[in-house]
Image (tube, helix red, strand yellow):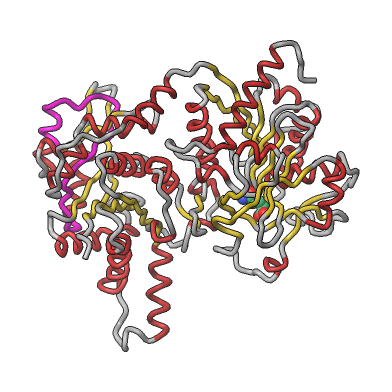
Amino acid sequence: MPSPAKYIFVTGGVASSLGKGIISASLAKLLQARGYSVTIQKFDPYINVDPGTLNPYEHGECYVTEDGAETDLDLGHYERFLNIPTSQANNVTTGRIYKQVIEKERRGDYLGKTVQIIPHITDEIKRRMKLLGESGRYEFVLTEIGGTVGDIESLPYIEAIRQLKLELGSQDCLVIHLTLIPFLSAAGELKTKPTQHSVKMFLEQGVQPDILVCRTEHELGKDLKKKIGLFCNVSEDSVIESMDAASIYDVPLLMEKEALDIVVLKKLMMPNQTAPDLSTWKDFLYRLRHPKNQIEIGIIGKYIELKDAYKSIAEAFIHAGAANECQVQVRWIHSEEIDNDNVAAHFNGLAGVLVAPGFGERGIEGKITAIRFARENKVPFFGICLGMQCAVIEFARNVLGYSDAHSTEMSPETKYPVIHLQEEQKSVTHKGGTMRLGAYPCEVVPNSLARNIYGKSQISERHRHRYEFNNTYLRDFEAAGMVASGINPDNKLVEIVELPNHPWFLGVQFHPEYKSTVDNPHPLFLAFIKAGLKHIESVKSGFQVA
Ligand code: GLN
């Protein structure tokens, strides 16, 4: 019988967006670096069954796991920090909890009882909180609770934590509360009152946090830590300062300096003698800080006002940039703003462009115009999902001469549906969880750019889309010079397209960005940056983009 897991809950107070996900991932990283097996899960109090149906403007990117769960973007941070995959079980929402309880009620499982928030909803929350811990695979299960303490919708989660603390005991369960210590410039002072209030509210709900992590712009100092500890009923060494950091990847080291991991291990009665081995992490940070080159990459998308909408892509550039000792600056370009007259100006100085994933009509023509420019002027191009589909449409229109070629997503009546809906998708009426989701195998054809980059013929990548390359046209494309270099071996769907007569032009139907981590930067991003560096060299040495 494996020893039971230790449960660490991370809650937030005072304000949202304090970085619970990064604090959770950083602590998990420190524990992992000490040799412990760790996983992180996120419980989101909103009523959507999953974030798949949320507009990216609301919650940022929807992150997809290997097993095809559409999840909160914090799971992306967990994977990027820990380099281990998460799954459906790692993200739970109120919608999912209620769905399960209501289905049980309809089946008659509650035997005539009145179904209530306590105990039925809280029991279901607790069951799910313990699920990964009971698998025997982890010594530590970190659970991040979305939202802030005091929100109406968080109440059942806080109640579940209260009960679990009692059931498991203080050796096996602790609560870390992340708060803000604001700096009032007029008074020239850091203020602890909002944190005191937040802890008070937590206490009213029956939970005494064990550790406080305090976000601050200025050092807290010993006295302030003492004061916070006194008013919030925690020992001084359990008040952890979390200073604003230049990069999220600095946070594990900041937390190590503050001994967060040691405090946690002591409270949970776990050995803490050996120091965490963070050599690979530090090596990554060193490269990040000491780039030998710098390039600018254009990301073309329609949600660029909210950078979180493309979180995994932005992070993948950071990983691959550091590995290449190259600082990658991103120029965010709104696809709706690109037209034939200004496209050259948008490309000025860019080492390459990435056309982002997306849904719907808005901004499509701008993406297609940009892709044409990249194709004709030999600028490195990387298309992801919708970006790949747009590359196919552009090629059909401007090389094959299929003037109104389109995806049936935007133009159901097009004469040339080069991107279309798969048969099994045609009968789908529900939006939630009905796309082609999660990891699928792909065979990479020999003598292609993709094969050269991956260095192997069998790969697996994650998907999130409904529409596909229409194989009726495959021969026409290949005859005109666009090659399908990645094929799903089971259903022959085209997963990668490329142009052999272009220095670097690659479109992928899948989302490579989901698999990029600090320890394993994604090969496609690594190669794209290399191509960008080469492009800039060639521009400098006299070759001018038209
Ligand atoms: N809208 C396209 C589809 O559903 C692309 C999706 C995406 O870019 N993730 O197929």
Residue 14, image quadrant: top left
From the top left corner, tell me how far across and down residue 332 is, in percent: 60, 31
Nearer to us in this view, 512 or 207: 512
Nearer to us in this view, 332 or 325: 325
Residue at x 38%, y 81% (from the top left corner):
105
Residue 403, image quadrant: top right
Q: Image quadrant for the C terminus?
A: top right
Residue 183, image quadrant: top left
Report the magenta residues as a range. Answer: 204-228
From the top left corner, tell me how far across and down residue 45 is, in percent: 37, 58
Nearer to us in this view, 249 or 224: 249
Left or right of 115, for residue 365: right
Residue 355 visible, this orientation: no
Q: Is residue 3 magenta?
A: no
Q: Image quadrant for the N terminus?
A: bottom left
Left or right of 59, for residue 209: left
Residue at x 55%, y 63% (from the top left corner):
433
From the top left corner, tell me how far across and down residue 363 is, in percent: 70, 42
Residue 521 visible, this orientation: yes
Q: Is residue 218 magenta?
A: yes
Q: Residue furthest top?
A: 541
